[in-house]
Amino acid sequence: MVEVQLNNETKVPEEMLIAFAVCTTLLVAVHMLALMISTCILPNIDAVCNLHSINLVHESPHERLHWYIETAWAFSTLLGLLLFLCEIAILCWVKFYDFSKYAAWSACIVLVPVLIVFLAFAMHFYRTLVSHKYEVTAHGLRELELLKERIEASDTEGRGGGQGTNGLGAGFYGGGVQVV
């Protein structure tokens, strides 16, 4: 795509050539950025994986650089694939414009369902990830709530009726008298 051969006497509109140049540049730039981020993060993850102490995982920069990792993934996967599909459509117009507009239209007609399926899958996949993250977070909050209730229950039992009372509702607790 980057090395497409164009005729000097082409009838392709200049706007289409500009769109092709911009899309090609964005496509290459997005993938290069994702590659650079991945290349910089990978040695840190590799180094932490080779350590035998779980406590050292928090010292790895990949935890702090989580946003960059997600950005690289979104760029290369979502944006990169969308740009690639647009690039194919524009390329078909640029290459077939002088020969057959029907060929260019047919390529776009084929790409529309592909784009719809791609976007539907991307939305489904993203919703599944968000749903899973929500469930994990909700489960963690329920566990914290149960832990809080257990702590409060054991704290109430420790001060209340069970330990060190003298039957009258008063007991010695921590060096002083506690009235219950």
Image (spheres, rainbow, N blue to C red):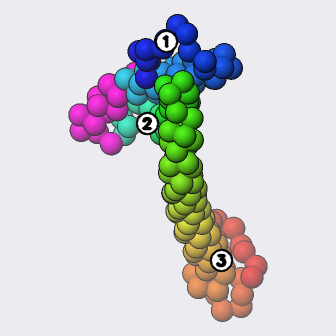
Cβ atoms at labels 3 and 1 below 8 Å apart: no
**What is the distance, in whole Å, between disc 3 and disc 1 at their CAs?**
86 Å
Q: Which amino acid type is marked by label 1?
A: Asn
Against 167, is 69 above or below?
Answer: above
Mostly what secondary structure, the magenta segment?
helix
Residue, disc 1: 7
Against 108, is 175 above or below?
Answer: below
Give the residue at the far top of this rendering: 8
Q: Which amino acid type is marked by label 2?
A: His
Residue 123 visible in the picture = yes
The segment highlighted magenta reads 40-54
Secondary structure category for the residue under label 1: loop
Q: Is residue 42 magenta?
A: yes
Q: Which residue is drawn at the image coordinates 43% and 36% (left, top)?
A: 58
Q: Does the magenta stretch include residue 30?
A: no
Q: How crowded is mark 1: few (under 14 residues within 10 Å), some or many (20 or more)?
A: few
Q: Which amino acid type is marked by label 3?
A: Thr
Residue 152 rendering spot, x and y as whole percentages? 64, 72
Position of the C terminus by quadrant: bottom right
Give the residue at the far right of this rendering: 179
**What is the distance, in whole Å, between disc 2 and disc 3 at their CAs?**
36 Å
Nearer-the-camera pick, 168 or 28: 28
Q: Which residue is drawn at the image coordinates 56% and 15% (left, top)?
A: 10
Q: Which residue is drawn at the image coordinates 49% and 12% (left, top)?
A: 7
Q: How many marks?
A: 3
Between tags 2 and 3, which lies in front? 2
Which is nearer the N-term, disc 1 or disc 2? 1
Residue 35 rendering spot, x and y as whole percentages? 41, 24
Residue, disc 2: 58
Quarter location, residue 50: top left
**What is the distance, in whole Å, between disc 1 and disc 2 at their CAs?**
57 Å
